[in-house]
Image (cartoon, coloured by chain):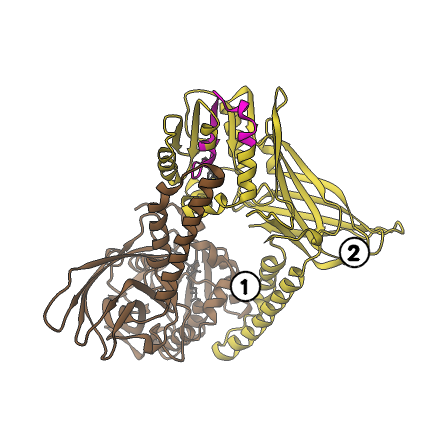
Chain colours: A yellow, B brown
Amino acid sequence: LAVDKAADFANYFCTYAFLYHQKEMLVDRVRMDAYFSSIFRNLKHFVGKTVLDVGTGSGILAIWAAQAGAKKVYAVEATAMARHARTLIAGNKLDHIVEVIEGSVEDITIPEKVDVIISEWMGYFLVRESMFDSVIYARDKWLKPDGIMYPSHARMWIAPVRTSILEQKQQEYEHAMADWNSFLQDTNLHYKVDMSCLSKPYKEEQQKYFLQTALWNSLYPNQIIGTPVIIKEFDCLTTTVEEVAAIRSSFKMHFYESQRKCSGFAGWFDVQFKGSPSNPADEEVELTTAPSAEETTHWGQQVFLLSPSVNLSAGDVLSCSLDITRSRQNHRLMDVKFVHQVERASGEVSPPITSPYAIE
Amino acid sequence: LAVDKAADFANYFCTYAFLYHQKEMLVDRVRMDAYFSSIFRNLKHFVGKTVLDVGTGSGILAIWAAQAGAKKVYAVEATAMARHARTLIAGNKLDHIVEVIEGSVEDITIPEKVDVIISEWMGYFLVRESMFDSVIYARDKWLKPDGIMYPSHARMWIAPVRTSILEQKQQEYEHAMADWNSFLQDTNLHYKVDMSCLSKPYKEEQQKYFLQTALWNSLYPNQIIGTPVIIKEFDCLTTTVEEVAAIRSSFKMHFYESQRKCSGFAGWFDVQFKGSPSNPADEEVELTTAPSAEETTHWGQQVFLLSPSVNLSAGDVLSCSLDITRSRQNHRLMDVKFVHQVERASGEVSPPITSPYAIE
Ligand SMILES: Nc1ncnc2c1ncn2[C@@H]1O[C@H](CSCC[C@H](N)C(=O)O)[C@@H](O)[C@H]1O
Ligand SMILES: Nc1ncnc2c1ncn2[C@@H]1O[C@H](CSCC[C@H](N)C(=O)O)[C@@H](O)[C@H]1O
């Protein structure tokens, strides 16, 4: 599982070097309000304390920690964005408190252990980007034994959904295959080459692309057609990289009444700022990325289509298992394996159906 | 100039592993017809000969070379597309002639020198992707002294253009900056952070993005407002990597009458299949990516905007120089420096204006 650093930079870090991309996060009001409140409503965690901000980006969380009374803040950023963070921190007259360090948190050194680690490390469906690994690494190396994690907890959610994206993607897929077939004829006619032996791999490639790749979407609450389920909870003080790298969950999906068709399921996350057992928050704050009519986040939800869709009768329950592992080509992306069986109200159980997905 | 292979794969090669992307090239009729004609109208270059196809992709050029009578074709492909090429070649019953080798042409070994090197290595504005390097490398290592290059010649063209993309991109840029300004206010108000010290780098980032990045476009011929100029010619038999890696050209742009505004310039290329001096083609074939009313290619043209635009009077001439070098972060992308001075009909010459661009 050795990671090539240059490839990781090309694949992952490069986008974070743009202010444009940092700004997209800085205008996410749900995200901003949660971190802002978690800090300023729990000043006791910051006043006179030392703080490590893992992946400071523009420097925003480090600045708030300093404004909240921290004695010293180490703000670590892997990309050249570190230089803009330095400008921003000086511009806000906090350079006597916040020290920006350009480098991977895995590589850098700070002169002391810290009271608080703060980080905004969450990717789509929580685990995309695998940045939690870096926070866990930093925790084990730099957090004092009685230190606090901001956020302190994280949870992954799943719920069945109905969405017209299913029909749209099915049509796009059909269209792509019709196009392929006329391509086969043209190539035969004009260029004397028979491409039909590539129809099977082409079909697989297009299925993957249109139907087996998780889709970003901002769902309305009424698109959720069954009870959301927590498939995984993390205590940020104790979670290990192994627990994050391979997530397995078995659960049942219960549908709300009158729902007759399930076009897929959605995954999202929430995180909590609760302090630590020995030093709990004065006021707990939660950041949720669940479907919402008013407040949406840049994370949205990840939608996994079921093609064909599952037709439901009253009382049907889905017995499911979900496996989330890392893609072999790129450890920051995920492979998902979803298995479901319909448990009919009659007691009859359908054979298991396996659906593979990529989170890209 | 050491290239990290894993990063190069992440940045560049990965897209070529998709049949979808290979298909985009295979449906480009201008491209296909040129290679097809160059081979089948010059059978003497292939009958009984040995051929190396650098970057075989789907295998199409190797198949044609074999169909044209080659004795042996080595088809080298860096990505896993090599496996599909093998399927396609077997499906067309040519696996006794074409041998697919998966690997970079820089790394692989073949048992003999070849009579012909064929390759479709051209990127946007010819040089993007820097794949010509690999073809030159293969030529110096594997082509017989009297061997032939397919294509044999390549040329880069520049012409002044008018295009409403200029106004569109200027507006998008203005919009992005207006948005930034309201972001500054919001962030000050809600989150107590003054972001104004990042306005200068943000402005630069947005200018680069909207106005200083070459744009793909398929221009109509009547958008060309002056005489196209050849800025560089390559003889594929003798060109060195150094000549490709840093291209410098000085030239004059002459405008057609009645043109009053120049919104930028466009770059494109053509390649010729002429055989070699000792073994010229029976029928020369040319592949051009110039603006055309009927036949467009997937390469289109690269448009470089001049913001502000240049206002012309009758008889004005632009005295220009163009420098194309490789981007430091990614050797497959280019930095362009364009300098122009207006030579008025009166003899007056304006001060030089330098415009930097990225080809991304
Ligand atoms: N291992 C690592 N070491 C240092 N920085 C990292 C890192 N992994 C990710 N990052 C950085 O972490 C940032 C995550 S985005 C969050 C940015 C900022 N804290 C905010 O809340 O707005 C990115 O800028 C990314 O470049
Ligand atoms: N150094 C190198 N060694 C081997 N293959 C290379 C290479 N550089 C680029 N390639 C491959 O060259 C191909 C160029 S695209 C052209 C594909 C095919 N010859 C056709 O004409 O349709 C890509 O598939 C790319 O993966």
In this view, the residue farthest toward the front is B189
Residue depth check, mark 1 versus mark 2: number of the one nearer the observer: 2
Examine the rendered structure and indicate whether residue B163 appears above or below residue B352.
Answer: below
Region rendered in magenta: A38-63
Circle 1 SS class: helix
The residue at which mark 2 appears reads as A259
What x and y, as percent, mark residue A45?
A: 54, 24
Q: Please tell me the numbered disc located at residue B87.
A: 1
Residue at 44% x, 39% y: name it. A57
Disc 2 marks a residue whose amino acid type is: Gln
Disc 1 marks a residue whose amino acid type is: Thr
Circle 2 SS class: loop
Q: Nearer the viewer, residue B96 or A315?
A: A315
Quadrant of image for the C terminus of chain B: bottom left
- The answer, for residue B330, to whether it is visible in the render is no
Q: Are marks 1 and 2 in contact (CB under 8 Å)?
A: no
- The answer, for residue B242, to whether it is visible in the render is yes
Mark 2 residue crowding within 10 angstroms, few (<14) / some (14–19) / many (20+): some
Same chain letter for marks 1 and 2: no
Q: Nearer the viewer, residue A80 or A9?
A: A80
- Give the chain of mark 2: A
